[in-house]
Amino acid sequence: MQRGIRCMLMRGGSSKGAYFLASDLPSSPEERDRLLLSIMGSPDPRQIDGVGGAHPLTSKAAIVARAAEADADIDFLFAQVVVDEAKVDTTPNCGNILAGVAPFAIERGLIAAQDSETPVRVRTLNTGTLAELVVRTPGKRVQYAGEEKIDGVPGSAAPVMVNFLDAEGSVCGSLLPTGNVSDEVAGVRATLIDNGMPVVVLAAADVGCSGHENCAELESNAALRQRVEEIRIEAGRKMGLGDVSKAVVPKVALISRPIAGGAVCARSFIPHRCHASIGVFAAVSVATACILPGSVAAAYAETPEGAVKRMGIEHPGGIFEVRLEVEGPADAPHVRRAGLVRTARALFDGIVFAHEEATE
């Protein structure tokens, strides 16, 4: 008999994933990953025999539990289920899937909803990053309908406020893993940065692009993809991540001047396909790079004045806005807090089935 496991499919930001209670999955990482691969239908480019959407943005999972430590309410483990490989990567964060964690925790009874709004402090176990999410809960129930629109998602929904409390150096241990605002990597200048997500920031022009191409144009350029991967692999070593040829981090962001009223234009590789928009933590890292004098991004960005900077990151689907609270002198600024608005929606709640052999 196939084993049924309780699961909620949710859209979080511009991603979609399967959300589970940790208590419903095996405690062994090996058994858990085998189960997730079966549930999502990997490895298979179509994921035809699972609930995955045949794309990195729709082949994700959230594993949620009450927090083990007093400074958080919820512990969240993010799992990137690779579409065409038998691999589950729990190295990176995912701020989009994070946006759905607080609503899911309330729906599952892990958090008691307050009237009007409910704040939930979530620790992402992958990196130890702590964030506060604020969910609308009129009548002590999660509200999904609302007026907030985010590029890359049709329609509108209730806002989920996300404030990152300690994202700096989440994977690499420091904001600038090499200690430099720019380095030479595989013959080009790059900013290697980690403010929630390790990102290799490159000038699009340095790899033969305008930076305003759409995803299909970038993905069809085999020479570009090979060159970006060459740079990414060398950057991974410089960032202390070792051999990243089989890893999903660092991401790569191709930077150019804004053309639609944002602060900067970006094309994000995740890492081998072009993101239809840009990931949450990648956007935070790119926005942070923009305010650092001497960085690759700073040369292209139109950065607003003031201690609170609303940074619009232009991407193939529109603009992603990051809110940075900055302190310190102009020649050595420091991001005290990064925040943004996402939305989330419960899509399906029920029982998902894995193959019998995945549960043995």
Image (cartoon, grey):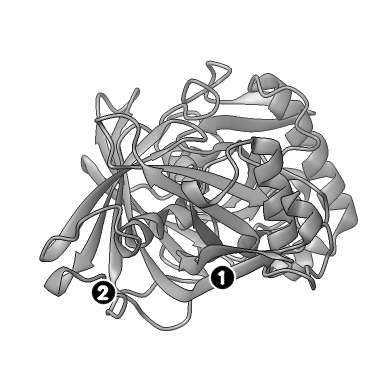
How would you rate the neighbour count of disc 2 (Cα within 10 Å): few for under 14, some for 14-19, many for 20 or more?
A: some
Which residue reaches farthest left? Answer: 115
Residue located 67% across and 24% down the image: 241
Residue 121 screen position, x and y as percent:
27, 43
Identify the residue position indicated by label 1 in the image.
Answer: 351
Foreground pick, 337 / 118: 118
SS at badge 2: loop
Foreground pick, 113 / 177: 113
**On the image, which quarter does residue 55 sit in?**
bottom right
Is 287 displayed left or right of 160 in the figure?
right
Residue 175 visible somewhere in the drawing: yes
Residue 299 screen position, x and y as percent:
51, 40
- Residue 68 numbered tag: none
Is 242 displayed left or right of 190 in the figure?
right
Identify the residue position indicated by label 2 in the image.
Answer: 143
Foreground pick, 41 / 324: 41
Say which amino acid is labelled 1.
Ile
Mark 1 vs mark 2, CA separation in Å: 23 Å
Which residue reaches farthest right? Answer: 223
Residue 185 visible somewhere in the drawing: no
SS at badge 1: strand
Residue located 41% across and 65% down the image: 261
Residue 262 screen position, x and y as percent:
42, 60
How would you rate the neighbour count of disc 1 (Cα within 10 Å): few for under 14, some for 14-19, many for 20 or more?
A: few
Is 325 displayed left or right of 250 in the figure?
left
Residue located 58% across and 17% down the image: 178
Mark 1 or mark 2: name the one nearer the start of the chain: 2
| 176 versus 248 height, above or below | above
| Foreground label between 1 and 2 | 1
Say which amino acid is labelled 2.
Gln
Residue 213 screen position, x and y as percent:
69, 65
| 192 versus 84 height, above or below | above
